Image (cartoon, grey):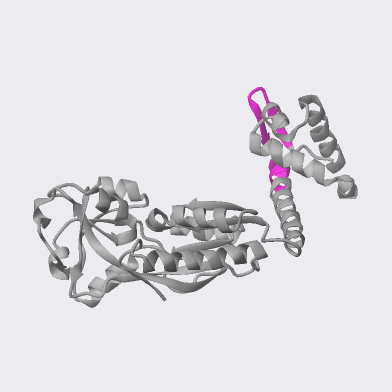
Amino acid sequence: MTVNTRNVSSIDLKHLRYFVGVVDAGSLSRAAPRLHIVQPALSNRMSALEQYLGTLLLHRTPSGVRPTEAGKILYASATRILRELQSVADELAVLSSAPVGSVRFGCSPSTSTVLAKPLIDAVIQKLPHVRFSFVCAASTDIYQRLLRGDLDLALIYKDGAVPGVTGTPLVRENMFLVASAEDPRFQNMEAISAQRASEFDLVLATQSRYFGTEVIHDRFLAAGVRLRVVAQIDSVDALFDMLAPGGAVSIIPWAACAQRERAGSIRVVPVSGIDLWRVLDFCVPSEHPLTPAAEAVASLARSVVAQLIGAGSWRHAECI
């Protein structure tokens, strides 16, 4: 692959925006109306861009287009350049107005059940000029997105220091044994001992080096108890589907099962004789300073978390 670098200066921002739009859409016909340009003109733009760089950027097929290896490189660079330029424009705008810009916030499904709506509502009300995205995914996925720069902020559980991310402890929350509300083994049970809990088949969240269920195993092992884990699942919904009367149970934070407990579909049982809790960290990429808009969202998120805990909407948790 030979790229004509002498012609790179001939590329303007419109070329980059059109190219990114075409790759995102997967076809010229779908991209054209989104980019407010007629398809023949857009096709000419793509051809001109390939001529400028001296290399093929798009594989064209009857069903659409996909980037070549050179196109993938250009797409990654163009996306980053456009994002950085937008960030600069947002920062300049904020000098004379309220916070402006795009902020992407992530958390795990076990936290989003209590945090998503209150935080989104607060941003809409208090930061109307911020384009806010709330991403819900496994902690490992959130971590990777922070590293790639796809997220600005996150509230996740992490076990110690992790490369490329700076975390500040924000919430300490208790974890509980959770079973089907119809499970006769837990009827009228106010608490269960760690030893007794280890006698049941357990379904837990998927383990990983930094973001798994090691904290649960560590707490039980400290009490001289080894758990009987029969399955690990990376989906909260799938985990709850595994709970059945007389079958498997789980150990999770209260926030993850708040809605189901209110609906009466599960039973939440404290584990006695063991200090069973985890800490959620407020995380940011170590290499990327926060924009003013992201700083404003970070401050608002901390306030929302404190309000939820103080009002009892996020039970069995405390701010650190």
**What residue sits 77% from the left and 37% below the top?**
56
The quadrant the C terminus occupies is bottom left
Q: How many marks?
A: 0
Q: Nearer the viewer, residue 231 or 258?
A: 258
Kindly tell me whether residue 291 is visible in this rendering: no
**What residue sits 51% from the left and 61% below the top?**
143
Residue 175 image position (x, y, % from top left)? 28, 65
Asked where in the image residue 102 lies, by quadrant, the reply is bottom right
In the rendered image, residue 256 lying in the magenta stretch gets the answer no
Residue 104 image position (x, y, % from top left)? 58, 55
In this rendering, position of residue 317 left or right of residue 21: left
Q: Nearer the viewer, residue 181 or 45?
A: 181
In the rendered image, residue 61 lying in the magenta stretch gets the answer yes
**What residue sits 45% from the left and 74% below the top?**
169
In this rendering, position of residue 105 left or right of residue 309: right
**What residue sits 62% from the left and 58% below the top?**
149
Residue 290 image position (x, y, % from top left)? 64, 66
In this rendering, position of residue 309 left or right of residue 14: left
Up-down: is 96 above or below 73?
below
Residue 9 image position (x, y, % from top left)? 89, 49
**Image: magenta residue range:** 58-73
Kindly tell me whether residue 148 is visible in this rendering: yes
Up-down: is 151 above or below 287?
above
The quadrant the N terminus occupies is top right
Most distant residue in the top direction: 62
In this rendering, position of residue 149 left or right of residue 300: right
